[in-house]
């Protein structure tokens, strides 16, 4: 099981230190939420932030594109040092093309499903991706409450993976605390994004260990 702190909730003035702190605490990925103020009602990072993080951490940079027309930016984020790039099926009419572009860029590919989007919308790309992210809140802001109905989606994706021999990991993002992480793990999730739960704590290392205790 992998823990991926979201730097959306980090102190941007100390971003390098915040990344090194969670890396030293034993996390597995750094999750980078890219928002354009169009597809979601918030604006965050561009490729330059990924490029600035690349030299300071050995951890995989898990880049979540919450942007319209993600195809326009895949190459830039790949060149900046992303290890995984994920695009929303709702953000493009050509999700298969987006996945192909990510794979051709030499990084791991992923697709993302909003809470109201069914698994059927990505059935025809599941064989070509390395990761699928199930949003367990509506994207745009940290600190939201977990949407219980999304657990069924995780279970469905785990069933399809087993039945078809797919290689993708199932990632979850939104309202992840030990209680919800355990539910998602039992449903079949592999990667757990936590932002405010980790970075909003006085002792983030203890929060990471609390997650680890229910995941391992």
Image (cartoon, helix red, strand yellow):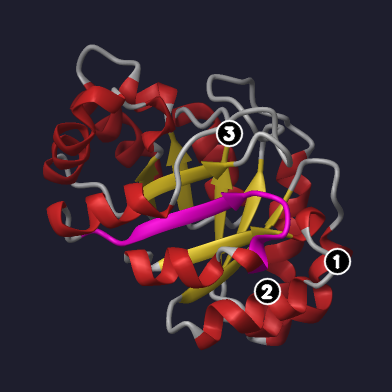
Residue occupying the point 60% across, 77% down: 129
| Image spot of residue 216 (x, y percent) | 34, 49
The CA distance from mark 3 to mark 2 is: 24 Å
Q: Nearer the viewer, mark 3 or mark 2?
A: 2
Query: Residue 6: x and y, percent?
Result: 41, 38
Region of the chain picked out in magenta, as a range: 59-71
Q: Please give the name of the residue rendered at 65% of the width and 77% of the height, measured from the top-left corner.
A: 99
Front of the two marks 3 and 1: 1
Q: Is residue 116 left or right of residue 171?
A: right
Q: Secondary structure at mark 3?
A: loop
Q: Which residue is mark 1?
A: 93
In the image: residue 130, left or right of residue 128: left
Residue 166 is at least partly visible in this image? no
Provide the residue designation for mark 2: 98
Kindly identify which residue carries mark 3.
174
* Mark 1 Cα-neighbour bin, 10 Å: few <14, some 14–19, many ≥20: few
Q: Which one is in front, 69 or 189? A: 69
Q: Nearer the viewer, residue 148 or 77?
A: 77
Identify the residue at horizontal 64%, vertical 20% (top origin).
145
| Camera-nearest residue between 118 and 157 | 118
Q: Position of residue 188 (x, y in %)?
A: 59, 57
60 within the magenta span: yes
104 in the magenta segment: no
Crowding around mark 2 (Cα neighbors within 10 Å: few <14, some 14 to 19, many 20+) is many
Query: Tag 1, which secondary structure?
Result: loop
Measured Cα–Cα span from mark 3 to mark 1: 25 Å
Q: Earlier in the sequence, mark 3 or mark 1?
A: 1
Locate the N terminus by quadrant: bottom left
Please tell me which residue is depicted at 57% across the width and 47% down the height of the picture.
172
Q: Could you tell me if the residues under marks 3 and 1 are in contact, i.e. CB atoms within 8 Å?
A: no
**Visible residue check, residue 48:** yes
Choose top left, top right, bottom left or bottom right for residue 111: bottom right
């Amino acid at each position: 099981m992998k823990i991926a702190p979201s730097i959306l909730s980090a102190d941007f003035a100390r971003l390098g230190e915040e990344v090194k702190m969670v890396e030293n605490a034993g996390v597995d990925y750094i999750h980078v939420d890219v928002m354009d103020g169009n597809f979601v009602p918030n604006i965050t990072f561009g490729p330059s932030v990924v490029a600035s993080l690349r030299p300071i951490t050995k951890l995989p940079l898990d880049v979540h594109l919450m942007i319209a027309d993600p195809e326009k930016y895949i190459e830039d984020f790949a060149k900046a040092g992303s290890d995984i790039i994920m695009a929303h099926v709702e953000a493009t009419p050509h999700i298969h093309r987006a996945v192909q572009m990510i794979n051709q860029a030499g990084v791991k590919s992923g697709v993302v499903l909003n809470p109201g989007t069914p698994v059927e919308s990505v059935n025809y790309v599941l064989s070509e991706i390395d990761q699928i992210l199930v949003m367990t809140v509506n994207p745009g802001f940290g600190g939201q409450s977990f949407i219980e109905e999304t657990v069924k989606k995780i279970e469905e994706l785990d069933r399809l993976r087993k039945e078809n021999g797919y290689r993708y990991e199932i990632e979850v993002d939104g309202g992840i605390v030990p209680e919800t992480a355990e539910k998602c793990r039992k449903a079949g999730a592999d990667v757990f994004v936590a932002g405010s739960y980790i970075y909003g704590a006085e002792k983030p290392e203890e929060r990471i260990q609390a997650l680890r205790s229910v995941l391992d």
